[in-house]
Amino acid sequence: MAMLPFHPHFRTLLCVSLLVAAPLAHAGEIKTLMKDMKLAMQGALSSTTMPELRGYVTRLESDAQRASSQPYRSDQSTYDEGMRSLQQELTEVDRAIQADDMNAAKRALHRINGTRKHYHDLLS
């Protein structure tokens, strides 16, 4: 397959465009993950059975893991700190689930909501 010759300036423009688009793609993925985390949190808090709660928490943990590996454009250290706090609080939720204590798990989830608001305020 033959490639069409491109003007050197077009190649430069294409490379610059790709470099600029990369952080935007990460920002878009973080936004998507955060929206899904919010939905998983709402589902977990409204759960009425442990299997249902466990499913939402698993989804929340998966999203949090993926989000924690994303670069954050403006304040990486605060973002990383917030993600570490989230991981620690999710560990508390897991302990409550392991103990089959839905009330304790939901209390831990409510604390996560407070932490989420705190870091959203810091990062906005």
Image (tube, helix red, strand yellow):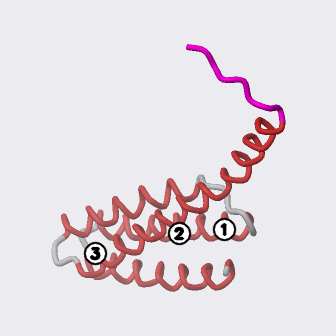
Please determine whether, in this image, residue 90 is positioned above or below residue 62: below
Callout 1 secondary element: helix
Residue 43: numbered disc: 3
> For the residue carrying disc 3, how many other residues have a C-alpha within 10 Å: few (<14), some (14-19), or many (20+)?
some
User: What amino acid is found at the position of numbered circle 2 in the picture?
Assistant: Leu
Q: Position of residue 26 (x, y in %)?
A: 60, 56
Q: Label 2: which residue?
A: 86
Sequence order check, earlier mark of 2 and 3: 3
- Magenta range is 1-8
Sequence order check, earlier mark of 1 and 3: 3
Give the label, 1 or 2, closer to the camera.
Answer: 1
Quadrant, the C terminus: bottom right
Please determine whether, in this image, residue 123 is positioned above or below residue 18: below
Q: Is residue 90 left or right of residue 51?
A: right
Within the image, what quadrant is residue 102 found in?
Answer: bottom left
Q: Position of residue 9 (x, y in %)?
A: 83, 38
Q: Is residue 41 left or right of residue 24?
A: left
Residue furthest left as drawn: 49
Q: Position of residue 77 (x, y in %)?
A: 74, 65
Contact between marks 1 and 2 (CB within 8 A): the answer is: no
Q: Nearer the viewer, residue 115 or 124?
A: 124
Q: Nearer the viewer, residue 16 or 80?
A: 16
